[in-house]
Image (tube, rainbow, N blue to C red):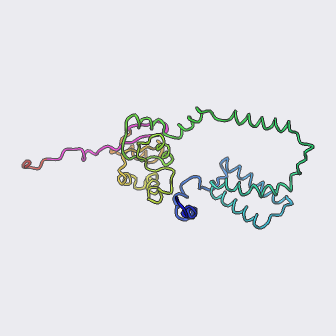
Amino acid sequence: PFTYELVFYPFNLAFVQKLNIAYVDEWASVDFNDPRGKVVFILLAGIILGALFSRYRWKLHELLLAAFALYAGLKHIRFLFLAAILLAPLLSKMLGEVIPPYRKEIDKPALNAAVMALLLAIVIYRFPAKANLQEAVDTRFPAKAVAYIKENHLSGNFFHRYMWGGYLIFFCRDTKTFIDGRTDIFEYTGVLKDYLDVEQLKSSLAIFDKYHIRYALVPPDFPIAYLLKNRVEWKTIYQDEVAMIFERVPSPAATAPAAVPAGGSH
């Protein structure tokens, strides 16, 4: 249904969606301090050493393709998969000059089968059980808070953590969510910028007024949680180790009965 717009979408992402690129983790550059970055560094060093000591001479188009793959993968970790796909055929040619050709007479099918069986056993042993997966989800997403929302039938506009939007849509469908992983549409409408401003405590309360936010579902260590804990117009109605729920309460001025003018009413 997007027709030609789908072809131009990558350019829209690259040149229009500045906040999306700057905020979402998958668009970040490779961090060589984390485990994934160290693996990338080892592979990159292997490619360079292989190119230096291999007798294979790269053609110009292969070199340009490899440079593009490495740039894309190192610039945005999301493109590491693309880099692997583009580099695999090129590296196979380079390794073909280093690794001796296949010799059927020295092949050992029984040993190969044993190694494959061992690897399969390791995969099966290490595959997480359903309980472990659920535990991992519960430590990152507000499962208990969602149960509280359902039990108490909380209704109204919610502000919540960006990465919890899809979880709320799936498990708490009656909740009016603020933002979710469809980041592009929220950047087009300005919601993403407002969300980031709330996270950074830039006119946070004014933004809550703008969207008529009644509840805030955020982690206890979020700066906005500290702010709301110290505002009389907000109260904590739920808290656990993963999430807190704040509710906006009417101000005394809004709930006080109107004063009767002097001289009585007409």
Residue at 66%, 59% (x, y): give it. 72
In the displayed structure, would residue 74 be above or below residue 165? below
Q: Position of residue 42 (x, y in %)?
A: 74, 51
Residue 54 occupies quadrant: bottom right
Q: Nearer the viewer, residue 7 or 52?
A: 7
The residue at the far bottom in this view is 60
Q: Nearer the viewer, residue 229 or 175?
A: 175
User: How many marks do you count on the picture?
Assistant: 0
Residue 19 is left or right of residue 148, and the answer is: right
Residue 166 is left or right of residue 85, and the answer is: left
Q: Position of residue 199 (x, y in %)?
A: 46, 51
In the displayed structure, would residue 185 be above or below residue 158? below
Q: Position of residue 82 (x, y in %)?
A: 67, 56
The residue at the far right in this view is 105
Q: Is residue 84 magenta?
A: no
Q: Nearer the viewer, residue 227 or 103?
A: 103
Q: Position of residue 195 (x, y in %)?
A: 45, 53
Residues in magenta? 237-259
